[in-house]
């Protein structure tokens, strides 16, 4: 015997029978049997309305009189629906009605009717002149076969009352399913597996915190945040859709929220208003979704697809790529990572290294996480070059390379860590040019060789530099161009390159633009938390992976320390001079001290030679399985880090695009990013208009009129993109000023 079910219904339903009810909410009609939603359709979907109610009657769930009484429906309408269901099935409600061809309004008659209607005649007068019935002409107008004459536009509907922040706070606090969870029906449907992802539903709201973040939405979508992610990720059904989660992570990055745990200190309902949701997910839910997204090969494939997209969109920037390793310090105690030298702190600290590929203006293309750092040369040849040879657009073909023996496919720029004549040779064999600083440049060149040149910088500025050039062949490497810059202090900065086409001044500018990548690291650390630990999880280190031999590192450190000490002693020894007029005792003391110093220097030389011999015998790299037990370590979780780093790359690129739009309208162009940071933190009024299908975002005015004028120019540029909010039909419209002029009703 089946178990009876208690007739527990959500609040606000209208009963058809004691066990069947419906509710209208947010333009949807949802039917319930007991506590379960069984069907839902749009209020304007008349075919679905007739089909489901006819089924209720045919299946014995309700009488025709019950349905007619509950909806105020004409009895004949329901009778016809029941007959159609029995004769044609559910498909009969959606079949296109059969219509015969025109018998009176033939194409020539239609052409005459269009002409008369365009002249301003009323349909009745046109029908009389053509000798047809007025009803026939009216039917043609309703069917769209004829254009209706211009009619006075109806008055716009009254605006929907907008909620204040205080009212929303009280509503969120009183939500039955938790703070801000006001969508009871949607969450109930998701819990029962009846909802794959809730659709964004915007409501009029005043003073929404961080409403200015929506300014970044056109740029985020244009950069492929959602378009590419849909091909590489697939979340299971749930209340929160995948697009909402990706938008939330990107907006949190631009809003400088900090780690995911910082979301606990934010009002979830207010963040939900930015995404068309009742609230954003809890941190625990967000971490669980992030764990699903970061699993498998999705993050790596997603990042590679974005890199291809960005390079194809900017082939000029992709022709010169900047490669550098960024040391990410680890202060935790989960694992004893190897130590790396951190230049910005001038210390050796436990850390991992990420290798980034950036454009000349600092915008990132891709990143390679190297938990067990093999060095830039191995990462470059092992992981980056195969990708770049495939992804860099506009590369010359084999015929062009053969016709010009000095032509290259693209250029790589890196610092002294990648300095290796053998590497230069291998890169040029693949017809890839490189530019880097020269190690141990030797004696200074005569100042007469230097001449003033105008050097174009990446940001468009042109500066004067003293430059000189020579050709040089290093041992084991190809013939190189060496360019030096002479500074006012007399210092000479030397660079070498296998780019044989570019003139000297742009060649020097290409290397000096490497600081744009350093600026990106600094900015991303300070604003986006680039070095922040995302997960406490660790993973085992493969025993076959190669790591630096600890014995070699120790011997190398000792050689460096003793060599530095010997150099200092040699300097003291050379500075010791015998002064005139000294007594014999003073001369004896001088000679004794100088002899002791000589003995100490010779002793250091012997010790250094001994250590160098030991270092030569010790392998520089060994497999992780050969490490002593006390020096073995585990790797930090890299999948989640790679996923979030990709989101941060998209956010930085979006912010850069907005900053480029702002620069021309600001008195101080360098303050564009600071201006954007203030806009992202500003409040805004949201006004959805379902009739015009727009979502108006009214930014509150800033501190001065000059800044507001620049923001207005930015809004006009963004409005021209006609960006539609994902999974809605609402086009974003940005304005500066309060949205109160749309209506004075506030709840």
Image: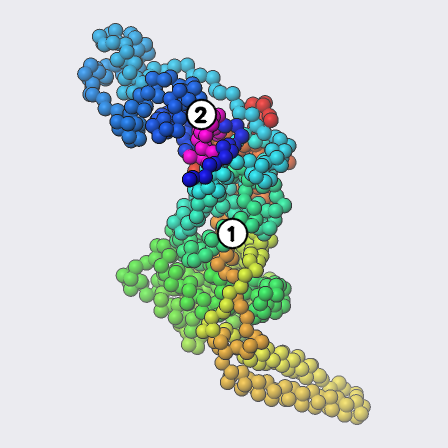
Of callouts 1 and 2, the N-terminal one: 2
As for residue 24 lying within the magenta part, the answer is yes
Quarter of the picture containing the C terminus is top right
Q: What element carries label 2?
A: strand
Disc marking residue 16: 2
Residue that numbered label 1 is attached to: 288
Seen at 27% across and 17% down, the residue is 140
Q: Where is residue 500 in the image (x, y as percent from the top left)?
A: 39, 64
Seen at 49% across and 50% down, the residue is 289
Q: Which of marks 1 and 2 is in front?
A: 2
Quarter of the image holding residue 54? top left
**Up-down: is 317 above or below 101?**
below
Instruction: Write down the region rendered in magenta.
Output: 14-38
Binning the other alpha carbons within 10 Å of mark 1 as few (below 14), some (14 to 19) or many (20 upward) gives few
Q: Which of 35 and 49 is in front in this view?
A: 35
Q: Nearer the viewer, residue 185 or 296?
A: 185
Quarter of the image holding residue 488? bottom right
Q: Is mark 1 on a helix, strand or loop?
A: helix
As for residue 267 lying within the magenta part, the answer is no
Q: Position of residue 503 (x, y in %)?
A: 43, 60
Seen at 40% across and 47% down, the residue is 230
Outermost residue on the front side: it is 1
**Up-down: is 648 above or below 407?**
above
Binning the other alpha carbons within 10 Å of mark 2 as few (below 14), some (14 to 19) or many (20 upward) gives many
The prevailing secondary structure element of the residues shown in magenta is strand
Q: Where is residue 636 in the image (x, y as percent from the top left)?
A: 53, 63
Quarter of the picture containing the N terminus is top left
Disc 1/disc 2 C-alpha distance (Å): 41 Å
């Amino acid at each position: 015997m089946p178990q009876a079910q208690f007739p527990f219904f959500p609040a606000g339903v209208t009963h058809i029978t004691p066990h069947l009810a419906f509710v209208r909410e947010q333009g949807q009609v949802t039917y319930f049997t007991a506590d379960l939603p069984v069907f839902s359709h749009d209020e304007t979907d008349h075919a679905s309305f007739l089909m489901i109610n006819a089924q209720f009657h045919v299946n014995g769930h309700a009488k025709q009189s019950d349905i007619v009484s509950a909806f105020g429906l004409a009895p004949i309408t329901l009778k016809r629906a029941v007959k159609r269901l029995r004769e044609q099935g559910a498909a009969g409600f959606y079949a296109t009605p059969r219509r015969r061809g025109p018998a009176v309004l033939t194409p020539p008659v239609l052409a005459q009717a269009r002409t008369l209607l365009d002249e301003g005649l009323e349909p009745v007068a046109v029908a009389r002149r053509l000798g047809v019935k007025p009803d026939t002409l009216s039917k043609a107008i309703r069917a769209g076969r004829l254009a209706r004459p211009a009619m006075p536009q109806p008055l716009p509907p009254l605006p929907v009352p907008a909620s204040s922040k205080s009212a929303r706070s009280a509503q969120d606090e009183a939500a039955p399913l938790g703070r801000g969870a006001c969508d009871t029906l949607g969450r109930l449907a998701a819990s029962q597996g009846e909802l794959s992802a809730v659709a964004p539903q915007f409501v009029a709201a005043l003073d929404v915190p961080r409403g200015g973040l929506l300014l970044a939405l056109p740029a985020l979508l244009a950069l492929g945040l959602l378009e590419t992610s849909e091909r590489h990720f697939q979340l299971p059904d749930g209340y929160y859709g995948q697009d909402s989660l990706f938008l939330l992570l990107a907006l949190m990055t631009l809003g400088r929220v900090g780690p995911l745990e910082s979301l606990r200190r934010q009002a979830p309902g207010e963040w939900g208003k930015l995404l068309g949701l009742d609230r954003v997910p809890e941190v625990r839910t967000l971490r669980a979704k992030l764990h699903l997204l970061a699993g498998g090969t999705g993050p790596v494939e997603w990042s590679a697809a974005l890199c291809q997209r960005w390079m194809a969109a900017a082939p000029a920037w992709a022709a010169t790529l900047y490669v550098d390793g960024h040391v990410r310090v680890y202060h935790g105690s989960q694992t004893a990572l190897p130590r790396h030298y951190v230049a910005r702190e001038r210390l050796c600290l436990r850390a991992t290294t990420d290798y980034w590929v950036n454009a000349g203006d600092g915008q990132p293309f891709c990143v390679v996480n190297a938990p067990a750092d093999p060095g830039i040369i191995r990462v470059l040849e092992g992981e980056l070059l195969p990708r770049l040879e495939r992804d860099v657009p506009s590369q010359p073909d084999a015929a062009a390379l053969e016709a010009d023996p000095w032509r290259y496919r693209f250029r790589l720029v890196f610092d002294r860590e990648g300095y290796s004549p053998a590497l230069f040779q291998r890169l040029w064999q693949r017809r890839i040019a490189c530019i880097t600083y020269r190690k141990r440049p030797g004696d200074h060149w005569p100042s007469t060789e230097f001449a003033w040149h105008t050097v174009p910088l990446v940001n468009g500025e042109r500066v004067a530099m003293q430059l000189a050039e020579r050709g040089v062949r290093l041992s084991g490497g190809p013939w190189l161009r060496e360019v030096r810059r002479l500074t006012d202090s007399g210092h000479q900065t030397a660079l070498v390159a296998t780019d044989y086409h570019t003139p000297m001044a742009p060649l020097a500018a290409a290397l000096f633009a490497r600081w744009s990548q350093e600026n990106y690291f600094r900015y991303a650390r300070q604003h986006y938390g680039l070095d922040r630990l995302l997960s406490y999880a660790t993973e085992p280190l493969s025993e076959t992976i190669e790591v630096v031999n600890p014995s070699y590192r120790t011997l190398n450190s000792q050689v460096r320390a003793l060599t530095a000490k010997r150099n200092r002693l040699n300097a003291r020894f050379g500075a010791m001079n015998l002064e005139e007029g000294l007594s014999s005792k003073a001369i004896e003391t001088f000679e004794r001290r100088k002899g002791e110093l000589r003995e100490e220097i010779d002793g250091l030389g012997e010790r250094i030679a001994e250590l160098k011999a030991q270092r030569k015998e010790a392998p520089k790299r060994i497999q992780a399985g050969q490490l002593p037990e006390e020096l073995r370590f585990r790797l930090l979780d890299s999948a989640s880090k790679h996923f979030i780093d990709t989101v941060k790359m998209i956010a930085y690129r979006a912010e850069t695009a907005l900053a480029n739009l702002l620069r021309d309208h600001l008195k101080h162009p360098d303050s564009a990013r600071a201006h954007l940071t203030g806009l992202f933190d500003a409040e805004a009024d949201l006004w959805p208009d379902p009739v015009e299908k727009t979502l108006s975002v009214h930014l509150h005015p800033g501190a001065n009129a000059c800044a507001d004028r620049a923001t207005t120019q930015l809004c006009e540029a963004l409005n021209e993109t006609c960006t539609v909010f994902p999974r809605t039909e609402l086009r974003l419209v940005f304005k500066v000023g309060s949205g109160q002029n749309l209506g004075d009703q506030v709840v």
